[in-house]
């Protein structure tokens, strides 16, 4: 009898042991955000209206048509007067960037954000187990991760990764890598640094799709500290709930819509094709098809299925004539939305496609206005605005949306673990946001660029008028 009981209990014991093992593995696989620090340059690197005009004037390859295009783009971009540019461009050396300029730009962003991150958390650089750096357009040897390890004298068995070419989506790619590493290594700390190298990559030609980068991209970046140590959960800000990655690199259209190339004069820059909006919309749709199943309640998913079928029947009866939209209500499972602060029209377009209102889009618009398009670091300025405005409450969920060259769309959802209220990088200006108007001063000062009379004026005369009086020829 005892033998029989033992034989019966043994499978039960093994099953319990296996379940305990799964629970422990799940606990170790959690990804907690302990802290993040966004970069803010010094005031002498601010790109206000006058600075932008001077930089444009220095490009001798521009004609009147390109000059007009640049000003129109800047006026409508959503950028404000206090964004920051790379040091060599501010100093007028964009035509001959040096390796020293590129390294200085990186060192400044890395040291400023990491010093603050380690100081805020009290965690020593020697305690970091995983280090991931993503910079798309600059990959020196030794790597930037090696540069950080050397500077902070980190441990010899640190797991270091240097990512390049990931574009504005690089930050979430790095976090996905960290999350997967957490499945293997227990109770570890990971640092992710996301930024971009602008100084050596300033486009000096006149191809319109390639000039766009000069108008939109600004200096910025962010360093983040993660852990899977359950004992540190009480110190964490956010917990990663899920991350979904979608890649369209197998499509020639997707691969080529956002690509670094040289123009016919040998000037290197980033070309954004006309098809990028269509590719981005397709990538976002495919990504959300997977993501929403993980984060939205079953009632909302059922409502969407029922309404979609009903709408399809109506459309069939009307022989293909549309009968209105029946989109998912993302707010049924999400409270906040980090939209990439790339450009004003993009923020509005993504917001419309997700059914968001002005309140939802305010953080992205304000991050774009104050700091510009800071590439892979941009999402963290948006998050910082939400925190500074005391929007983030315990148990709220945040959707982060990102797009990157390749073409890829990577989105993730965070859970807020406690009420957040740190003013962070916004502390010196949060009281001024949102401003009463987002109209760019270029609109008033240089609106004459659209004057039809300029068709009979030479470009040299226009430039002379700008230099002398700051107004157009009259």
Image (spheres, rainbow, N blue to C red):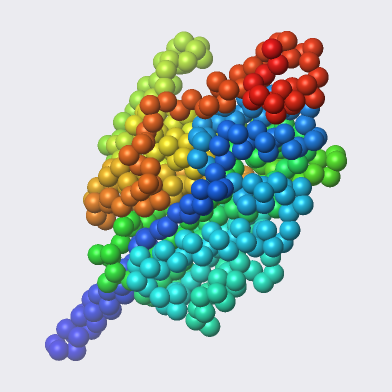
Residue 242 vs 348, above or below: the answer is below
Horizontal side of 204 relative to 391 (left or right) equals: right
Check the image and name the residue furthest to the right: 265
Task: Point out the image quarter for the N terminus.
Answer: bottom left
Horizontal side of 393 relative to 30 (left or right) equals: left
Residue 454 at least partly seen: yes
Q: Residue at x 60, y 34 (%)?
A: 50
Q: Position of residue 57 (x, y in %)?
A: 72, 34
Q: Residue at x 60, y 73 (%)?
A: 146
Residue 101 vs 458, above or below: the answer is below
Residue 350 vs 461, above or below: the answer is below
Q: Position of residue 246 (x, y in %)?
A: 54, 47
Residue placed most toward the observer, 408 or 462: 462
Residue placed most toward the observer, 129 or 386: 386
Q: Position of residue 357 (x, y in %)?
A: 37, 28
Q: Position of residue 221 (x, y in %)?
A: 51, 53
Residue placed most toward the observer, 261 or 411: 261
Residue 296 at least partly seen: no
Check the image and name the residue furthest to the left: 1
Q: Residue at x 68, y 58 (%)?
A: 101
Residue 335 vs 419, above or below: the answer is above
Q: Residue at x 37, y 61 (%)?
A: 35
């Amino acid at each position: 009898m005892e033998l029989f009981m033992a034989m019966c209990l043994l499978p039960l014991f093994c099953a319990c042991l296996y379940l305990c093992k799964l629970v422990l593995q799940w606990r170790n696989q959690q990804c907690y955000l302990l802290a993040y620090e966004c970069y803010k340059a010094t005031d002498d690197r601010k790109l206000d209206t006058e600075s932008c005009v001077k930089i444009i004037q220095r490009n001798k390859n521009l004609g009147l048509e390109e000059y007009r295009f640049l000003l129109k783009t800047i006026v409508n971009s959503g950028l404000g007067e206090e964004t920051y540019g790379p040091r060599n461009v501010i100093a007028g050396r964009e035509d001959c960037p040096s390796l020293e300029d590129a390294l200085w730009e990186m060192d400044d962003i890395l040291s400023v954000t990491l010093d603050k991150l380690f100081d805020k958390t009290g965690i020593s650089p020697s305690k970091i187990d995983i280090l991931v750096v993503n910079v798309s357009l600059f990959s020196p040897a030794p790597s930037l991760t090696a540069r950080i390890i050397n500077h902070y004298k980190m441990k010899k068995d640190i797991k270091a990764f240097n990512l390049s070419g990931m574009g504005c989506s690089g930050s979430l790619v790095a976090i996905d890598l960290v999350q997967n590493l957490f499945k293997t290594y227990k109770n570890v700390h990971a640092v992710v640094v996301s930024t971009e190298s602008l100084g050596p990559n300033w486009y000096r030609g006149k191809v319109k799709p390639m000039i766009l980068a000069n108008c939109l991209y600004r200096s910025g970046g962010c360093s983040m500290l993660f852990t899977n140590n359950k004992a540190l959960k009480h110190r964490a800000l956010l917990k990663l709930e899920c991350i979904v990655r979608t890649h369209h690199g197998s499509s020639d259209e997707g691969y080529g819509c956002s690509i670094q190339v040289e123009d016919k004069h040998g000037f290197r820059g980033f070309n954004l094709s006309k098809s990028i909006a269509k590719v981005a919309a397709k990538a976002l749709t495919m990504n959300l098809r997977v993501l929403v199943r993980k984060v939205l309640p079953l009632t909302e998913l059922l409502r969407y299925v029922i309404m979609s079928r009903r709408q399809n029947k109506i459309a069939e009866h009307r022989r293909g004539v549309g009968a209105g939209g029946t989109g998912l209500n993302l707010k049924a499972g999400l409270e906040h939305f980090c939209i990439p602060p790339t450009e004003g029209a993009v923020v509005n377009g993504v917001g419309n496609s997700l059914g968001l209102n002005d309140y939802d889009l305010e953080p992205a618009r304000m991050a774009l206005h104050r700091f510009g398009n800071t590439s892979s670091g941009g999402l963290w300025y948006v998050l910082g605005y939400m925190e500074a405005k005391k929007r983030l409450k315990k148990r709220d969920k945040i959707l982060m949306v990102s797009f990157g060259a390749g073409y890829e769309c990577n989105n993730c959802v965070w859970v807020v673990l406690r009420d957040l209220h740190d003013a962070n990088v916004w502390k010196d200006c949060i009281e001024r946001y949102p401003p009463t108007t987002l109209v760019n001063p270029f609109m008033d000062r240089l609106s004459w660029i659209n004057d039809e009379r300029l068709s009979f004026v030479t470009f040299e005369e226009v430039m002379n008028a700008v230099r002398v009086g700051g107004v157009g020829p009259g």
